[in-house]
Each structure stands twice: as structure tokens, then as C-alpha cells.
Amino acid sequence: MAEIYEFVFIGLALFTAFLAVRLERLIYSVVSFLFMSVLTALLFLVLNAPYAAIFQLLIYAGAVVILILITLHTIKRW
């Protein structure tokens, strides 16, 4: 059963990573990157790596996305 979740999370993470690269609007790319980071953290949880999931959420889904949003807000490029 865990293998099914692994493949679903990997597929969704790849799809959102593709969207993050291909979307025209930067704000949509950032949201897609956020979803990809959360899906990667969920994949770590399925693989029984809770500390990696916590760091993934704190560093990528938290800090990096906030820094990108602050930068976009500063340069007014949505």
C-alpha cells in the first residue's frame, strides 16, 4: 500500500515541478513550487523519514517560498 502512495506523490511532485518551470506568471510558479515541496515532504513521511519531512517543510516550503514571495513583492513582478 505504501508503494502506491510513493508513486502517487512522485507523480504529483513531478507534475507540479513541471508546472513551476512552464507557467508564465511567476506567482503561479511559486505556488506550484510550494505544492511540490509539500508533496516531497509527504513522500518523506511515507518513506519513514519524519526529520527529512520536517526540514523539507521548514526550509523549502517555508523559508524559500517566503523569500521568493518577498522578492516578487519588492520588484512588483507578479
Image (cartoon, rainbow, N blue to C red):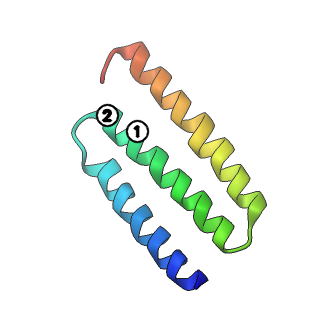
Whole-percent x and y of residue 67? 54, 28
Number of marks in picture: 2
62 or 74, nearer to the observer: 62
Q: Is residue 58 left or right of residue 27?
A: right
The residue lying furthest to the right in this view is 51
For disc 1, the neighbor class at 10 Å (few under 14, some 14 to 19, many from 20) is many
Circle number at residue 30 = 1
Q: What element carries label 2?
A: helix
Question: As displayed, is residue 29 above or below residue 48?
Answer: above
Who's the residue at 67% across and 74% down the image?
47
x, y percent for residue 75: 37, 15
Between residues 3 and 52, which one lies in front from this camera angle? 3
Badge 1 element: helix
Q: Residues within 10 Å of mark 2 (few under 14, many from 20)?
A: some
Task: Please tell me in which quadrant of the rendered image residue 49 appears.
Answer: bottom right
- Residue depicted at 54% across the width and 29% down the height: 66
Quadrant containing the C terminus in the rendered view: top left
Q: Which residue is drawn at 32% across and 38% down?
A: 28
Circle 2/circle 1 CB separation < 8 Å: yes
The N terminus sits in image quarter: bottom right
Picture residue at 64% right of the left edge, 47% below the top: 57
Q: Looking at the picture, which amino acid does disc 2 mark?
A: Leu
Amino acid of disc 1: Val
Q: Residue 33 in the image: x percent, y percent?
A: 44, 47
Which dot marks residue 26? 2
In the rendered image, the residue lying farthest to the left is: 24
Q: Where in the figure is residue 2, as x and y percent of width and height?
A: 60, 81
Query: Which picture quadrant has residue 61?
Result: top right
Mark 2 and mark 1: Cα distance apart in space: 6 Å
